[in-house]
Amino acid sequence: MRQLLNGNEAAAHAARLARVEVLASYPITPAAPAMEKITQFIAEGSLKARFIRVESDHSAMAAALGASLAGARPFLITNSQGLAYMSEVLYHTSGLRQPVVMAVVNRALAAPHSRFPEQGDAVAQEAAGWIQLFCENNQEVLDSLLQAFRLGEDEGVRLPVMVNYEGYIQSHTRETVDLPQQEEIDGFLPLMRRPALDVANPMAVNTVAGPELYMDFKYHQDAALQQAAAVLEEVSAAYARLTGRDWGGPVAGYRLEDAEVVLVAMGSLVSTARIAVDALREEGEKAGLLKIRLFRPFPAVAVRQGLPAARAIVALDKNIVYGVGGALGRELRASLYGHASVPVFSYILGLGGRDAGVADLAQIYRQVRENMVAGLTPAAYQWYGL
Amino acid sequence: MELINSLAAVPDTELFTGGHGGCRGCGAALAARQAMKALGPRTIITIPASCMATIGGSGLTTAWEIPFYHSLFECAPAVASGIRAALDIQGIEDVNVVSWAGDAGTADIGFQSLTGAAERQENIIHVCYDNETYMNTGGQAGSATPYLAATPDTPAGKPTPRKDMLAIMAAHRPAYLATASVAYPLDLIQKFQRAREIEGFRYIHILAPCFKGWGIKEDQTVQLARIAVECGLWQLYEEVDGRRRVTVIPERRLPVREYLRLQGRFQTMDEATIAALQAAVDRRWQEVPS
Amino acid sequence: MAAKDLPLVPGARPGSMAAAAAMERIREQRPAIDKEKCNLCRECLLYCPDAALAIAGGEVRLELRFCKGCGICARECPARAITMVPEYAGDRGLVGEE
C-alpha cells in the first residue's frame, strides 16, 4: 500500500508493523512527531504497546533497556542532545547484548544551539557498540527499521541498532512510501523472547567484571558486532524477496563499473549524489557513487571491493570530528591503507543544516578531478560551503 | 494477606545469601536481606551504582537468588518502569518490580528518574536504603547527609541540613510510603508485605547505618538504627492515601545527644546545636498521635 | 589465545556466591553461642547481615563460611547468650577449631 509519508511517519509505521511492545521516548525536535504518531497507533488500537512517558532521554533509553532485559521488544526515537544525554545507557545496552532498535533523527549538537540536520550526533556515538544504519529516503527509513529488528535480534548478533535519518530533510519531507502488509512482516520478524530478567530463571545481570573477565566480554561483543555486516546482507536479501526492494548490504554502488572519481556518502546526501552522478555522466564524466549504508561496524572489505576502478575518492561528511576531520574520510583512508593507493579527498559540508545540493556536489567533483589530474596530494580535510 | 507477626513466622529462605561482598556489619546488606523475606522469589530488582549494586555480584558469582540488574546510577526507577511495561505486555502478573537505590541514587543523581516514575504512578516499589553518605566512593557528603556531619569532603561538618526526601516523595502522592529501620525487622517486613499488596507507586525509605561512614563500631549497626528511632530523629510510619500511621512508638525515649555522641562524624557538633536539634525533635514528637 | 567462554549477557547465576563463600579468610572473631542461655528468640537471625545464623535441630547454628565476625549478634542478643571470641591470639596464631 503506497502512502505519502514523511520520515517520522515512516518510522512510526515501521514500529507498528514490527509490533513493538514498549515505546519509551522523550520528545525532541524534530523527532517528536514520530513518537506522537506511535502513541496515536496505540490509542486507536492498531498497535498493542505500552508507552512509558519518561521524564528524560536518559530514562527513555534506560526504560527501553529494562523492557528488553525483561523480554519485550522496545522502540525509541531521539537525536542530538537526547542521544548525547543517553550515551552511557547506549554502552549498557550494547554491553548487555540487548537488541533495542532506535530511530535517530540526525540533528546538529549544540553549542551553538541548532535544531537543523547533520550527522555529528550519531558519529559521536560511533564507539558505543551499536549497529548504525543510515537511510537515503523515507522508503529506506521504513525498510531499514524493519530490517534492524531482525538484524539486531539475530542469534549471532544480539546487539542494538540505530537507524539514522536526517531532521527536516527526511523527518518533515513527504515521499511515496510503500507499506508492506502486516502478515508479511509478521513472517519476517517473528517475536523472540529471551529475557535476561526472568523470575523463572533468575540471573544477576551486570555483575562487576574484574580484569580477568572484562576484556573477554568485550572481545565477544566486538566479534558479534563484526558479524552484523554479513547478517545485514542476509536480512536485506530476505527483505528483497519479500518486498522486491533491495537496499543492498553494508554498501551500495551506483554507476561504479568504470568510475574514476567516486563520491562516498551516507544519509540523504546519497540521493543528492545520485542525481549529481547522473548529471556528470551526461557530461561524459566517469563519476560514480558509493553509498555507506552501514556505518558501524564499518564495512571496510565491502568498501574496498566496491571501488574497483577508482582513481580518486571523495568523502562527503556531514559531521566534524574536531581536530581529525570527517568520519567517512577517516574510515575510508583507514580501510584502503595498505590495499590501494587511491587518494581520499575529504570534505566537511552541510553542517547544522547548511545546504548541500546537486550543484555543490558537482563543484566538489570538479575540484577533486582537477587535483587528481594535477597529481596533488589531498589535504587532511577541507571545509566546503563556508 | 497474613502479616508476619513473629520472628518465628519469618520465612527461612534467603534470597540475598551469605557470601556477599559487604563489609562486616553492613547495614545495607541487612536491609536487603530483611526486605527479601517479604518480597519473595517473584521479584525483579534493579540497583543502581552503590555498595548494594556491587556486593551482591562479582564476576560470575552472585548473592541474589532473584533476577537482579546492576543499573546505571541515574535511572533505576526508569529501568524498573521498562521492566514493568515488559511484564504487563507479556501478561506476567504477581511479580514485584523493585528499584533499590542508596541515598545518592534516590535523592541526588537518581532523583530525576525517581520523580518521573513517581509522577507517572509506575507500578513499582522504590526503596531508598539510606546510610546518609556516598559510602561506595568513600563516604563523601550528599543531600541526605545530616547537618554538621563530618565526611571526607566536608571535614568541618556539612554546612547544610539533610534533604527531606520523605516530604518530597509524599508530595508525589504515592500509593504507599513508609519509613523503616534495620533495627525493627518485623516492622520492616510488614511494610514490604503491605507494599506488595498495593498497586501503584510505592516508596520505602530504610535507615541503614554504615559503620565506616558514621564512625561507629562494626557491631553497632543495629544499635544506632534503633537509637535513631528512640531519640526521635528517625520516625517509623507509613502513609496510605496520604494518611499517616506511626507504626512503632519506642519503649524508651533517649536524648539526641546520646545518638550523636556515639558517632565519630558528629564530634564537632556543639552543645547549642544539639539543643536546637533536641527542641526540633521534641516539637515533632508532640505531633505524633499516641 | 582464545577468549574465555562466557555468558552472552554478562552476569551470574544464583547460589554462586554462597557456594564460594570463605569468610574465614577475613574473619578476626567469631560468635560463641551459649546453648544454655539461648532461648531461641531468633533476633540474631534477622540482625545478621550475612545470613550466617539459622535454627536447626532446636538450636542456633552458625554458618562459619558466611560469618565475617561483625559481632552484631553478640551485641543484640537479649539473653546475652553470644560472645565474640578471637580467631587470632597474638603470637599463638590461629585459634584452633572447636
Image (cartoon, rainbow, N blue to C red):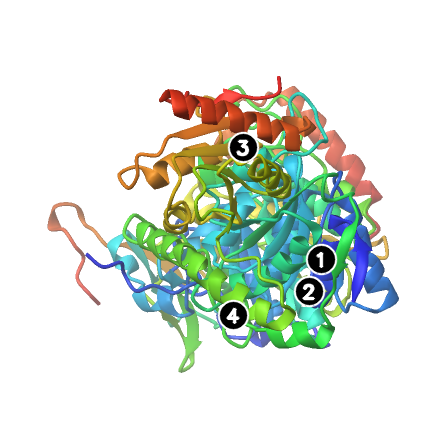
- Asked whether disc 1 touches disc 2, contact meaning CB atoms under 8 Å apart, the reply is yes
Q: Chain of mark 2?
A: A
Q: Chain of mark 3?
A: A
The amino acid type, in three-letter code, at marker 4 is Cys
Determine whether A236 is above or below A57 in the image: below
- The answer as to whether the residues below labels 1 and 2 share one chain is yes
Residue A20 is labelled as: 2
User: What is the distance, in whole Å, between disc 1 and disc 3 at their CAs?
Assistant: 31 Å
Q: Secondary structure at mark 3?
A: strand
> Residue at left 47%, top 36%?
A328
| Earlier-in-chain disc, 1 versus 3 | 1
For the residues carrying marks 1 and 2, which lies nearer the camera in this image?
2
Q: Quadrant of residue A339?
A: top left
Residue A23 is labelled as: 1
**In the image: residue B275, left or right of residue A296:** right
Q: Secondary structure at mark 1?
A: strand
The amino acid type, in three-letter code, at marker 2 is Val
Residue B192, percent across and down?
A: 67, 63
Residue B34, percent across and down?
A: 55, 62
Q: Chain of mark 1?
A: A
User: What is the distance, in whole Å, between disc 2 and disc 3 at their CAs?
Assistant: 32 Å
